[in-house]
Amino acid sequence: MRNVLRRIAFGVLGTGMVVTMAAGAATAAVAAPQHPAKVVKALQWPAVKQNAQGNRVRTIQYLLNQRGYKVTVDGKFGPDTTAKVKDFQKARGITPVDGVVGDKTWPKLILTVKQGDKGDAVRAVQDYLKRAYGYTSLKVDGVFGADTAKAVKSFQKKYGVKDDGVVNEVTWNTLVVKAP
């Protein structure tokens, strides 16, 4: 009896086991297996802060520009970029307001872009693909045309992301996390 109660306490019922108590004896029958709920793993984003340099910083700068926080796109996370990130965090209610682009800031900074879109968010995708992933013939012109769509689909396929040509949160995350 104690073993039955322990199994119940440790979740055996949740795995498809049905326990029936009858006249002081415990009997077990296997029910149809239950399908566990799909577990969605939260995306992990790199923490990028003042004094950082490179492609991630350029992407942050392009995205800040797209969001209306004008900053020079030079790949250097200096005081001006830090101040603009803090302004962005404050406006979006992100705490702490620390100027670090990490797990809380990246998801609010990125924008989904797809064929037909224009702007600095598209430039960010094009620049990242060109500089970090070797799509050297790709123009960084801010126009999400056929060439950009082809490069995005190729990138998505290579990294196991749904290859639909849409740069959503998962594709952005893959771009900034998997960069060589």
Image: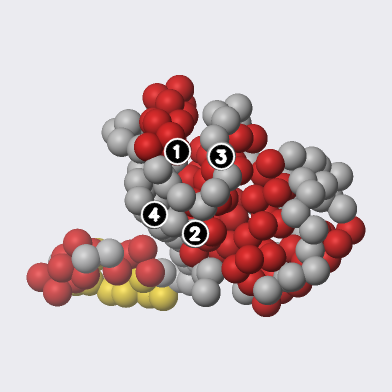
Q: Amino acid at mark 3?
A: Thr
Earlier-in-chain disc, 1 versus 3: 3
40 over 122 or under it: above or below: below
Instruction: Say left or right for 78 vs 176.
Output: left
Tag 3 secondary structure = loop
Seen from this angle, which residue lies furthest right?
A: 146
82 over 48 or under it: above or below: above
Check if mark 4's residue and mark 2's residue have beta carbons within 8 Å.
yes
- What is the x, y in percent for residue 26? 22, 71
Seen from this angle, which residue lies furthest left?
A: 2
Residue beneath disc 4: 52
The residues bearing labels 2 and 1 have C-alpha atoms spaced at a distance of 13 Å
Residue beneath disc 2: 54
Tag 1 secondary structure = helix
Earlier-in-chain disc, 3 versus 4: 4
Please give the label number shown on residue 81.
1
The residues bearing labels 4 and 2 have C-alpha atoms spaced at a distance of 7 Å
> Who is closer to the viewer here, 114 or 13?
114
Tag 2 secondary structure = loop
Q: Residue at x 70, y 49 (%)?
A: 123
Residue beneath disc 3: 72
Tag 4 secondary structure = loop
Front disc: 3 or 4: 3
The residues bearing labels 3 and 4 have C-alpha atoms spaced at a distance of 15 Å
Earlier-in-chain disc, 2 versus 3: 2
